[in-house]
DNA sequence: CCCTTTCGAGAACGATCGGTCAAGAATCGT
DNA sequence: ACGATTCTTGACCGATCGTTCTCGAAAGGG
């Protein structure tokens, strides 16, 4: 057959993800990627196709890593409300302690690429739909279990938390002032009392 | 003396703002700007210096146009809470009806440029500080006027609304689904009851 | 062994990037 | 009307962009 690959495509994709995540799409050049991944230019193209495809694959990978973790956390058996609180607080904490100013890769993509890149927009919407519906079913379950008053609207509450989470990530990317984000999260969570 | 300018620098800056606003910094080339502004390349450089300076001036102009409007609205005499509600709802409505997918120019800058552009980051933080403190003083006034229960924390509430506004703009840039944004806004405003 | 495939390093591709320059055209004060 | 000055126009710059190609070396399977 042939010579075996000397680099791990999985690790290379992870490396590319980290670079795109920090700098965004346009500000990251193929030369940057070649340097950072430590693999040859030609291998990069042979393995991932193009810069755009590489970005989409990195975005896909990010979604595969992040989305299920949140969904599982929110759908774990037992009380649902504490799980929701934990997710929101973790978003605030991660945004506040984000010294690399990375924010959320999906959110960054939504702002930089989605308006003029339908493939990216589709992937963003997929992650967002998963997040919103995970929050919705958790809150629905909370209401059914008596953790949440009957008159609350789980759909609307989930949407409000979802939008807040996007805001946390955006603010954290520029100015991860801990007090600001923690206050925002705790006030929003007061709606669940 | 000398020949007078044939173009209106103010209108040109406004045009540049619109282009940067829609496409972002990196995805907008000087060639795009020359086409869109209708003025010569050299005139552009003579008037605005460089692409980066032009972007910062556009950002400055956006801030000068947007920030005071909100601050005035929130500091108008009379009941404070309705003004806060109106501002939040207008953000949701503008984000939901944003068919050009522009979002907020400051928010877009925060995501694309702020992490590696200190000048842009400073301007973002200035707008954000104005917005947050305008919300804070409005809510403080609301509490003093008996519109808000004594035990509420105006600072924390303002921070929560501030973060939510950022989220509204981000979500609106990719998917201005009206229901999502309106629900988010109205649920957040329920915290003021 | 040989053949094939993939590797790394780098040259080279055309296109486009942000930015500059050299004219000619137009407008002022005199 | 004239000269001084500053505009517009469009060609032009080197650098960098994403992408392809060449090349010799290295590592499998027959």
Image (tube, coloured by chain):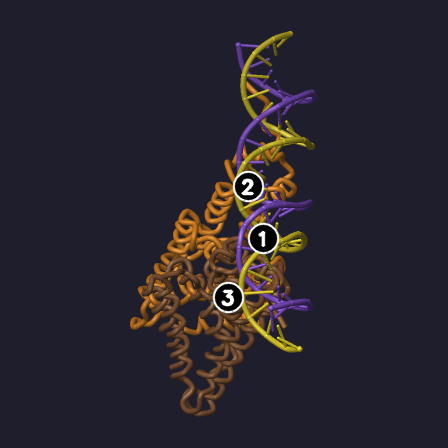
Chain colours: A orange, B brown, C yellow, D purple
Which residue was labeled with disc 3?
B12
Nearest to viewer (mark 2 / mark 3): 3
* Mark 3 belongs to chain: B
* Mark 2 belongs to chain: A
Question: Is circle 2 on the same chain as circle 3?
Answer: no
Which residue was labeled with disc 1?
A23
Q: Is residue A58 visible?
A: yes
Please give the name of the residue rendered at 41% of the width and 83% of the height, measured from the top-left corner.
Answer: B83
Q: Secondary structure at mark 2?
A: helix
Mark 2 crowdedness (10 Å alpha carbons): few <14, some 14-19, many ≥20: many
Q: Secondary structure at mark 3?
A: helix
Which residue was labeled with disc 2?
A13
| Residue B193: x %, y % from top left | 38, 82
Please give the name of the residue rendered at 51% of the width and 38% of the height, measured from the top-left corner.
Answer: A50
Out of D4 and B129, give the one closest to the viewer.
D4
Q: Is residue A103 visible?
A: no
Question: Is circle 1 on the same chain as circle 3?
Answer: no
Asked if the residue under mark 2 is in contact with the one under mark 1, i.e. CB atoms within 8 Å, the reply is no
Choose top left, top right, bottom left or bottom right for residue A131. Answer: bottom left
Rounded to the nearest angstrom, the CA distance separating label 2 from label 3 is 42 Å
Mark 3 crowdedness (10 Å alpha carbons): few <14, some 14-19, many ≥20: many
* Mark 1 belongs to chain: A
In the rendered view, tell whether residue A163 sits above or below residue B70: above
């Amino acid at each position: 057959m042939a010579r075996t690959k000397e680099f791990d495509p999985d690790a290379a994709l992870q490396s590319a993800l980290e670079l795109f995540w920090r700098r965004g799409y346009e500000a990251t050049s193929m030369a940057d990627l070649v340097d950072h991944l430590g693999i040859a230019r030609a291998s990069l193209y042979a393995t991932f196709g193009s810069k755009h495809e590489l970005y989409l694959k990195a975005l896909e990978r990010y979604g595969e890593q992040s989305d299920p973790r949140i969904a599982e956390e929110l759908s774990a058996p037992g009380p649902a409300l504490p799980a929701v609180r934990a997710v929101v607080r973790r978003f605030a904490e991660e945004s506040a302690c984000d010294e690399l100013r990375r924010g959320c890769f999906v959110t960054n993509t939504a702002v930089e690429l989605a308006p003029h890149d339908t493939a990216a927009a589709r992937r963003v919407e997929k992650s967002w739909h998963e997040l919103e519906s995970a929050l919705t079913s958790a809150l629905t379950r909370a209401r059914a279990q008596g953790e949440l008053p009957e008159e609350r609207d789980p759909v609307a509450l989930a949407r409000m938390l979802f939008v807040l989470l996007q805001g946390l990530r955006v603010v954290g990317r520029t100015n991860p002032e801990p007090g600001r984000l923690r206050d925002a999260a705790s006030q929003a969570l007061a709606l669940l009392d």
